[in-house]
Image (cartoon, helix red, strand yellow):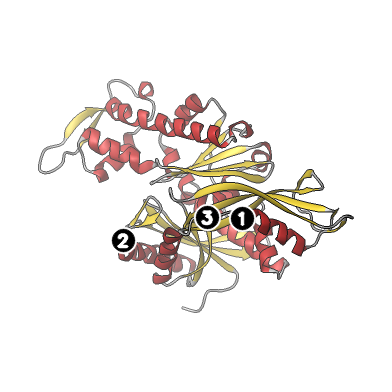
Amino acid sequence: MASQPDNLIAAIDVGSAKVCALVAEVTDSGLRYRGHGVAPSLGSRKGVIVELDRAVASIQKAVEAAENAAGAPIERATVGIGGAHVRGLSSHGGISLGTRPREIGRDEIKQAVERARTIPLPPDREVLHLLPQEFILDEQGGVHDPLGMMASRLEVRVHIVTAASSAVQNVVIAVNKAGVAVEDTVFEPLAAIDSALRADERELGVCLAEIGAGSTELIVVHEGAIAFTGVIPIGGDHFTNDLSVGLCTAPAEAEKIKKTYGHAVVTMVPEGNEIEVPSVGDRPSRMWSQRVAAEILEPRARELFEMLRETLRQSGTSERCVAGVVLTGGGAQLPGIFEVAESVLRRPVRLSWPLPLARMPSLLAEPEFATVLGMVQYAQRSRLARGAQQDRWGARLKAMLVG
């Protein structure tokens, strides 16, 4: 196979449940689907690599399937980062430009942002993203791009996404060992913004909650800028584990039951419905009321959204989510979870179906693929910014602004 063409963009989502590799082609009319591959995720748990060799094998399997579908090799890719180790914080900084107003250039913007990012971090953490929220010119805020404007003082508010250095490096090492160079890393819900949120939601204020297998990752967008990022340590696997223990069945069987018969609202399940539950060991299967499964799932769903509500309240961003909450990720497809979310949050809630790429197969138009679809769009946005500006820092800053 020849080398990866420059007009192809690849993304790899290393999740706790599955690994997905996606290849898109850059055309004059936008991105076009070329191929994808999915493999069960082995060696990764809650966004952290726990068994390197098994994780590498899973990534290789997904990449090979994507290469075969695309008819081209994947040599470099953007890789998603998630998990409970990711944390966000906001900062503020600025510089004086002199006693008289003068034109703001890229160097001044860079200096102001560097001032805002100079906050002490533990040695085991690294900055994943530096996301400008707004620039302030002579105490006048709300400026998105101050380049070429006049002021005597330039300030900036930024949101900084940090991650555990070891967790990030282990994901990068696993992808590299699978034969793929990592072009960029991106916090998964930041990438999902491109495929899951509408422009009016981003401007009005919305919380995107990506319910993955190992955790639920949050990002609040207000007036087109990132206001908050966070992670709740509850995901789809917790629902599965609850069923496994409650019904005394193997986790794999509990996952099937969750997907086929699971419901997060007990009263929405007919009383007479029964399901067959395989036993562990050599014991015969048993018949259980479907409502028993719902009685196990509903408390976990309520706990998830109670934690989400409290997280938004403590971060001071709850009132900014005027457009409500958008759910995405594989865990968002559990029947009844939408109703539980609205009941607990008392806000508008919708399930997001990702915006499709041209020629994309319909099976990818599911919430669980929102992240990897957003990642190729994020990568393309970053590439365009780098092409428009040779200055590496300026390109990255522009790529981080949410349009």
Is 124 displayed left or right of 199 in the figure? left
Neighbor class of circle 2 (other Cα within 10 Å; few <14, some 14-19, many 20+) is some
In percent of the image, x 29 and y 36: which residue is there?
242
Neighbor class of circle 3 (other Cα within 10 Å; few <14, some 14-19, many 20+) is few
Q: Quadrant of residue 140?
A: top right
Say whether disc 3 or disc 2 marks the residue closer to the N-terminus.
2
Q: Position of residue 250 (x, y in %)?
A: 22, 43
- SS class of the residue under badge 3? loop
Say whether disc 1 or disc 3 marks the residue closer to the N-terminus.
3
Q: Position of residue 182 (x, y in %)?
A: 50, 67
- SS class of the residue under badge 1? strand
Label for residue 328? none
Neighbor class of circle 1 (other Cα within 10 Å; few <14, some 14-19, many 20+) is many
Q: CA distance from mark 2 to mark 1?
A: 30 Å
* As drawn, 23 above or below 331: below
User: Which residue is label 1 attached to?
Assistant: 130
Is 8 displayed left or right of 391 in the figure? left
As shown in the figure, which amino acid type bears the numbered disc 2? Glu
* As drawn, 67 above or below 253: below
User: Which residue is label 2 attached to?
Assistant: 51
Mark 1 vs mark 3: in front: 3
Q: CA distance from mark 1 to mark 3?
A: 14 Å
Q: Position of residue 80 (x, y in %)?
A: 49, 57
Res. 355 in view = no
